[in-house]
Image (cartoon, rainbow, N blue to C red):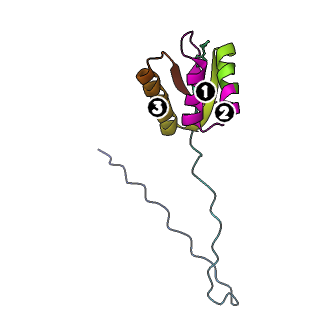
Amino acid sequence: MATKKPVQPKPAAPQPSTPDDGGSVVLERLTQRTKPPQMHQVLMLNDDYTPMEFVVVVIQEFFSKDRETATQIMLKIHLDGRAVCGIYTKDVAATKVDQVLEAAKRAGHPLQCVSEPVE
Ligand code: TYC
């Protein structure tokens, strides 16, 4: 049975030296290889029962919006059925959803919140 030889990484090619380089080392800028993380948007959904004021306070508190911006987002949810409250990395977005759902549950409101990857 033929066994495969493990693939060894190629050793770095020796750097050519010029008579006048004085032994100094030139560091080349490496290409950025890490991709930025996939971002997730947190959407809040409309319902017929959660008070508008509660939604505005939740958006201010958990999405760091001023009162005017929070009111505009709440009205967009009310009119369109949903709106983006913020965009975060996956874990942070999941935490925001948990915080909103927990606050709504504590207050006895049916407010719903979801997160989804941004295209
Ligand atoms: N539609 C609700 C009302 O009329 C208000 C509301 C807004 C509820 C946004 C949920 O995510 C929401 N009281």
**Residue count near mark 1 (Cα–Cα under 10 Å), binned few <14, some 14–19, many ≥20:** many
Q: Is residue 3 left or right of residue 86?
A: left
Which of these two is toward me, 43 or 46? 46
Disc nearest the viewer among 2 and 3: 2
Q: Is residue 112 above or below residue 68?
A: above
Among the two numbered marks 2 and 3 on one chain, the one whose residue lies closer to the N terminus: 2
Instruction: Name the residue at 59% across, 46% down.
Output: 35
Instruction: Name the residue at 42% across, 21% down.
Output: 105
Give the residue pinned by disc 1.
Answer: 56
Instruction: Name the residue at 48% across, 33% down.
Output: 94
Measured as percent of width and height from the top left, residue 55 is found at 57, 24
- The amino acid type, in three-letter code, at marker 2 is Arg
Q: Is residue 38 above or below residue 77?
A: below
Measured as percent of width and height from the top left, residue 65 is found at 64, 36
Q: Is residue 15 left or right of residue 98?
A: right
Quadrant position of residue 43: top right
Cα distance between the residues tagged 1 and 2: 7 Å
Give the residue pinned by disc 3.
Answer: 99
64 magenta-colored: yes
Disc 2, SS: helix
Q: Are marks 1 and 2 in contact (CB under 8 Å)?
A: yes
**Residue count near mark 2 (Cα–Cα under 10 Å), binned few <14, some 14–19, many ≥20:** some
* Residue 101 seen anywhere in this rendered image of the structure: yes
**Residue count near mark 3 (Cα–Cα under 10 Å), binned few <14, some 14–19, many ≥20:** some
| Magenta region | 44-71
Give the residue pinned by disc 2.
Answer: 67
